Image: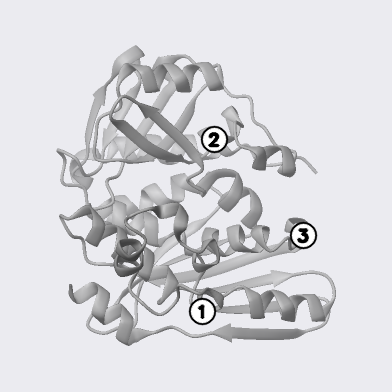
Amino acid sequence: MSRPDLSRRAAGLVEALINDADALRLAVSTGPHGARIVDAGIAARGGLEAGRRIAEICLGGLGQVAFQTCDRFAPWTTLVTVGTCEPVLACLGSQYAGWQLAAGDFFALGSGPGRATAAKEPLFAELGFRECGEEIVLVLETGQMPPAEVIEDIRAATGVAGEKITLILTPTSSLAGGVQIAARVLEVALHKAHALHFPLDRILDGRGSAPVPPSAPDFIVAMGRTNDATLYGGEVQLHVSGPADEARDLAQRLPSLTSRDHGRPFAEVFAAYACDFYRIDPLLFSPAQVLVTAVEHGVSFTAGAVDPALIARSFAG
């Protein structure tokens, strides 16, 4: 069975986003080397709906992202939900923000199907997956416009002409940025499962949800809230094949509460490590609560718990 073409599937979503740019409060311009730049929160206002649609682009057109109302975290009653029947490709092959792009004082983490065309990360060798396309899209978590050097790096890594590159910019502190980061709740679970060495080819389907955090102009506050949405408000269900006891073990090891750094808002954890992201326990980056279903045995295992009180502490500021 052939694998889906992530860039091709995302292309229609990108064109629809750009066609609706005015309604979504986005600004579209031409950048260095002819690259198409979509500002979703730097000079442009953007919004929650833009973030939802950008999240679907991040998934390479292989996932569904929606808003849902729920009083579990009241008064923050809006959840973002995400689901895909291709969780490994959609989440790890596309949505994961694994491509570091830097030049001078510019830095951004790149996500989206363009990563699979570059395939610079070791993960793609593990997945045995690389795309060859004539146009790509990347979503960059950044508050700056990318310089020519960054676009040249993308051109060199992908072999794609500058005018066939679309970069969507979503600052963490923006409305769109908050949604598209919270919509990574399922991807975070896949990344943790990979870190735990669970066989990725046995993860068949996935669904997740997280509360949409209120935006904040301060980057550290915004970063804290977007992380807390998953760490303390994220819920994920994975459908897996294989032995039931291995599904149980995955469920027990997957939630964020297995980390030594669990229990405080992320901004406090970040400050405690002198703002050194790499000193934080990597096992923290997980959804709060998981349900793992062993499809061949008809049994499910749950572990972890959401923490509405901590969400309130984080979101209220």
Amino acid under disc 3:
Pro
Amino acid under disc 1:
Leu
Q: Which residue position is annotated with label 1?
A: 257
Residue at image position (51%, 43%) is 98
- Find residue 19 and report its horizontal and vertical position in percent: 29, 36
The answer for how far apart the CA atoms under marks 2 and 1 are is: 30 Å
Q: Nearer the viewer, residue 297 or 62?
A: 297
Q: In this rendering, does residue 281 appear at all?
A: yes
Quadrant of the image occupied by residue 169: top left
Whichever of callouts 3 and 2 sits on the residue coming sooner in the sequence is 2
Q: Is residue 295 above or below residue 35?
A: below
The answer for how far apart the CA atoms under marks 1 and 3 are is: 22 Å
Q: Which residue position is annotated with label 3?
A: 199
Q: Quadrant of the C terminus?
A: bottom left
On screen, residue 96 versus residue 126, left or right, reads left
Q: Which residue position is annotated with label 2?
A: 115
